Structure formats: structure tokens, C-alpha cells
């Protein structure tokens, strides 16, 4: 997998932080979110697989998951990808930022840009083909996640550092993650912050610190222990 990022890596104005690694965003996405959630192994069995992501940003993680899903599953299987975004980027910006991987995504980036919804707050359901649906929720995750109804199989926790963006790692988010999970639902995140680890454990997840991507020493993976009956 090559990374040909020639332009400056995209930075969030609101958080003064990068959307993905300046060294190799695509490799980071695979390492943290796909490998961290044991994909593709985890989605080989179920007919329908649901991923929920906490910050859509450029859609790099979504495109990586979409491509891998279509490459590793059977035609009767479907992927529902749900993602929150409080500060949606323009479609043109997404096209520009992910341009280095235009060929790699093999038509999917153009399709995302074409069907990207207007930046109107609320739930936007985008049927990309008969197997892949993207639900983009343009809102603060703390306001929107309590309204979500879903059976999540894997969490992509990607919302900037808890030290600069504590709202993304709030009790509301963690409690609703537990509500939307089943026993064995997996999670992965780039951070290994103690606050995140403790929050996830309190919400009922088993968590493990593993080696992080590139210069990051550690990250967290885990799974939901199950609801008390
Ligand atoms: C590290 S970036 C995500 C990168 C992204 N997954 C990608 O593939 O490009 C984190 C994202 O979370 C969004 N965000 C931050 N706080 C939020 C909140 N409270 N609710 C919803 N989205 C939020 C940011 O605007 C940003 O786009």
C-alpha cells in the first residue's frame, strides 16, 4: 500500500489538529481501525455488519472499510457505516485531501464526493450501492448519539485527543456506546489515554493497550462484555 501524500495533510480549523497521520494516513487507518477491530476476520460471518465511527472528518476510514469489505465478503453481505461529524468538510475538500488515494479507492472516492450530503444538521442516509450504506450524522455526537438506534458490531473511535476534545470522550458517548453494543462488539482507537480507558471500562468494555501506529507508543482495542440481565 503506497502513500503519495504530496500536499500538506489536512488540519481541522476548529481543533488545530490533523485529520490523519502526516506520515501515512492510509496505513494509519488500516493499522488502527481495520486491524484494531480484527477486520476482515470479524465481518466474514454475519450477513449485515454495522460500524459506528465517532468523527467522519475526510471519510478516509470509511473508504478504507468500504474497499476492504467489498474485497473480502460475499455478495449477499452488507455494510452499514454510521459516522458523526459536528464540523462537516465540503465535498470538494474531501476530494482534494484524499486525492493521493484516488486510484487506490478505485471509484469509491468519486462516488462519496458525488453523494456527499449538504451540510445540514441531522441524519443523512446515503445508499452507495446495494451492499453499502453510509449514515452521516451532522451534529455534536453528544446530542445525536442518544437518538441513534443500531446494533453496532465495531466502533471506530476517532475524535482528536481527549486532552483537546474532551466532548468526544464524554460519559454520554460511552454510555450510549454500551447501549448500542452487544456482547463481543469490538472497538479500536488511536489513543491510549487513561481517561478513555477508564471510561470504556466503566461503560462495560474489556480494553487492552497494544502497540500504536508509527510514533504512537500505544493505542486501545477492546470488546463489549455484554449487558447485565
Ligand atoms: C481525527 S478527525 C477524524 C478523521 C476521520 N475519521 C477521517 O477518516 O478523516 C475527528 C473528527 O471528529 C469531529 N468532531 C470533533 N468533536 C466532535 C463532536 N463533539 N461531535 C461530532 N464530531 C466531532 C471533528 O470535526 C473531526 O472531523
Image (cartoon, rainbow, N blue to C red):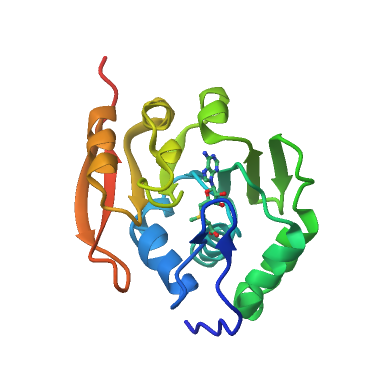
Identified at 60% across, 77% down, the residue is 101
Give the percent coordinates (x, y) of residue 115: 78, 54
Seen as rendered, the residue at the extreme top is 229
Q: Examine the image and state in which quarter residue 137 appears.
A: top right
* Viewer can see residue 149: no
**Residue 153 visible (yes or no):** yes
Asked if 106 appears above or below 169 in the picture, the reply is below
Q: Closer to the camera, 89 or 30?
A: 89
Q: Which sits in the foreground, 80 or 167?
A: 167
Residue at x-position 65% and y-position 80%: 103
Tell me where residue 40 sits by quadrant: bottom left
Quadrant of image for the C terminus: top left
Q: Nearer the viewer, residue 214 or 195?
A: 195
Q: What residue sits 66% from the left and 49% below the top?
A: 88
- Corner quadrant of residue 5: bottom right
Q: Does residue 192 appear left or right of residue 82 in this picture?
A: left
Residue 161 image position (x, y, % from top left): 38, 51
Horizontal placement of 120 versus 104: left or right? right
Could you say where residue 14 lies in the image, as x and y percent from the top left? 57, 51
Residue 163 point in image, percent of width and height: 35, 47
Task: Give the residue drawn at x 52%, y 52%.
Answer: 15
From what the image shows, is residue 155 above or below residue 175?
A: below
Relative vertical location of residue 182 with respect to residue 38 in this rendering, above or below? above
Please tell me how many numbered marks the rendered image carries.
Answer: 0
Amino acid at each position: 500500500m503506497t502513500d503519495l501524500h504530496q500536499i500538506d495533510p489536512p488540519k481541522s480549523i476548529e481543533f488545530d489538529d490533523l485529520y490523519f497521520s502526516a506520515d501515512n494516513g492510509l496505513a494509519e487507518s488500516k493499522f488502527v481501525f481495520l486491524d484494531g477491530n480484527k477486520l476482515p476476520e470479524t465481518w466474514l460471518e454475519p450477513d449485515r455488519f454495522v460500524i459506528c465511527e465517532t468523527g467522519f472528518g475526510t471519510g478516509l476510514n470509511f473508504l478504507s472499510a468500504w474497499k476492504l469489505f467489498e474485497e473480502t465478503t460475499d455478495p449477499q453481505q452488507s455494510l452499514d457505516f454510521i459516522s458523526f461529524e459536528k464540523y462537516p468538510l465540503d465535498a470538494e475538500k474531501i476530494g482534494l485531501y484524499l486525492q493521493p488515494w484516488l486510484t487506490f479507492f478505485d471509484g469509491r472516492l468519486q462516488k462519496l464526493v458525488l453523494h456527499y450530503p449538504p451540510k445540514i444538521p441531522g441524519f443523512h442516509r446515503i445508499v452507495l450501492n446495494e451492499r453499502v450504506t453510509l449514515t452521516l450524522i451532522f451534529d455534536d455526537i453528544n446530542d445525536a448519539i442518544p437518538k441513534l438506534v443500531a446494533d453496532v458490531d465495531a466502533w471506530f473511535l476517532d475524535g482528536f485527543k481527549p486532552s483537546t476534545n474532551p466532548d468526544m470522550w464524554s460519559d454520554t458517548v460511552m454510555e450510549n456506546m454500551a447501549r448500542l453494543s452487544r456482547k463481543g462488539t469490538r472497538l479500536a482507537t488511536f489513543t491510549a489515554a487513561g481517561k478513555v480507558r477508564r471510561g470504556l471500562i466503566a461503560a462495560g468494555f474489556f480494553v487492552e493497550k497494544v502497540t500504536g501506529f508509527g510514533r504512537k507508543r500505544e493505542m486501545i482495542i477492546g470488546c463489549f462484555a455484554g449487558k447485565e440481565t
